[in-house]
Structures are given as structure tokens and as C-alpha cells.
Amino acid sequence: MDTGAGQGRYPPFPAPACAHLVAVEPSPAMRGHLERRIADERLENVSVLPASWPAPDAPPCDVAISAHVVYAVREIGPFLQHMDAVARRACFLYLAIRHPASFISPLWERFHGQPRRPLPGALECLCALHQLGIPASLDLVPATSRIAFADEAEALADVRFRLRFPPDPRRDAEIREVVRATFERDADGALLPPGQPAALAVIHWSKA
């Protein structure tokens, strides 16, 4: 079971090894992308459950996974406990040590004049699991992708959104200067925000 399957980035990978995969996704817009991905990939053993998590109608499963979902989960205890309850064999969480958007923190302080509260990541999730009495472990794996922008216009739009600003020519010019000074270009010319991690975390526990 994939809890918070989003647009369907991850189901194509475990699906070939499963008898059946349930992809749980509450957002109608996300489900539209997810269902198209399932059809395009011809994943005949994947079904979609339109529900938030915890999902009372979620069936039992052998393995429950969740990738890059828990950062914004306000009630993390029920989320993790329900994963643990529906899984017969094991649970896996894939997420960053720090929230992927942590690169915005220095910009937030610069433009808003106050520190941005850090959002939780893998270490906070691991601590929450142990506080719930779930003896999870954490392994590091190489990051296979990073936040990247095709050009300055795309970077400007994203940074402006994350800073919660409307378009403004003067402020946009200042944001562009920061992007030019601090973002790096990769071999393909894409702009990369600074400080992105080289590794991600897999948190896992067995039910044996």
C-alpha cells in the first residue's frame, strides 16, 4: 500500500513485485495524474483508494510505504499508527533528513525579517515513531533527484510562491539577484538551490 501516492511517481517501481498495490490519494487533481500514470504504465495490479490517511476503508496489506508525505502531516501520530496497523509485515518511509524546501529559510529571514520555523524531516519522524513505541530504524540512501529549475523565471516563480509574495517588479528584481548569486547550474543548465542533501532517509520497521 502506497499512502499518499500523489501523481504516481513511485507506484510503477514496487508494482511489478506485488500481487496487488493500493495507491491511497485524497486529492482529486493528484488522482487524475495518478490514474493516467497507471494507465500509461499498464499497471493492471494497481488500484486507487480516494481517501485521506488514516483511511478507515484501507484494507490490510503486507507492506505499507509512504514517500515524501509526512512533512506536512499535522497529526503525525495517527498517520504512523495507522500505517503500522494495516501492515502485516513491514512499513517504509522515504523522506529527507531536512525538509526539501529548507533552502528557502535564509531567503525567508532576509525578506520577512524573522527566522522561518524549520519543518520536520526524517529525524523528527524517527523520534515520533519511538515515542509511539514503534522501534523503527533509519538508513541513508543516495539522493537520486534534487529540486531544479529550468531557468530564472521558473526559479523566481517558485521562490516567490514559497515566500508568500504576490508579483512585484521591485521585489522580483531582488529575488532574481539572490537566485543569481546563490543558485548553481548543473551540467544541463538547470538552476539548483543551495544546500540540498546528497542523501535521503529510509525509515523502516518490521512486524514480525
Image (cartoon, helix red, strand yellow):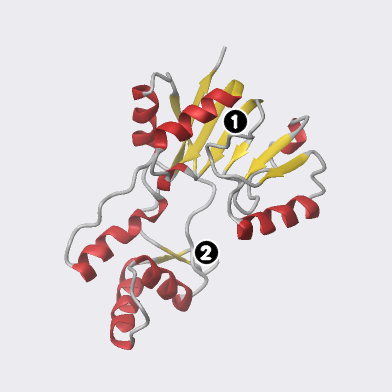
> Residue at point 60% right, 24% down?
87
Q: Residues within 10 Å of mark 1 (few under 14, many from 20)?
A: many
> Residue at point 71% right, 36% down?
21
Image: 85 above or below 20:
above
Q: Please, what is the three-letter code of the amino acid marked with disc 1? A: Ala
Extreme residue in the left direction: 113
Relative to the observer, which residue lies in front, 73 or 17? 73
Q: Please, what is the three-letter code of the amino acid marked with disc 2? A: Ala
- From the top left corner, tell me how far across and down residue 89 is, in percent: 61, 19
Quarter placement of the C terminus: top right
- From the top left corner, tell me how far across and down residue 82 is, in percent: 52, 29
Image: 164 above or below 134:
below
Q: Mark 2 vs mark 1: which is more N-terminal?
A: 1
Extreme residue in the bottom direction: 169
Task: Please indicate whether residue 95 sits to the left or right of residue 159 in the image.
Answer: right
- From the top left corner, tell me how far across and down residue 33 is, in percent: 67, 58
Q: What element carries label 2?
A: loop
Q: What element carries label 1?
A: strand
Quarter placement of the N terminus: top right
- CA–CA distance between discs 2 and 1? 36 Å
> Residue at point 74% right, 31% down?
17
Image: 172 above or below 41:
below
The residue that disc 2 covers is: 187
**Quadrant housing residue 136:** top left
Relative to the observer, which residue lies in front, 3 or 15? 3
The residue that disc 1 covers is: 64
Eye-nearest disc, 2 or 1: 1
Would you say the residues marked 2 and 1 are in contact, meaning their CB atoms lie under 8 Å apart? no
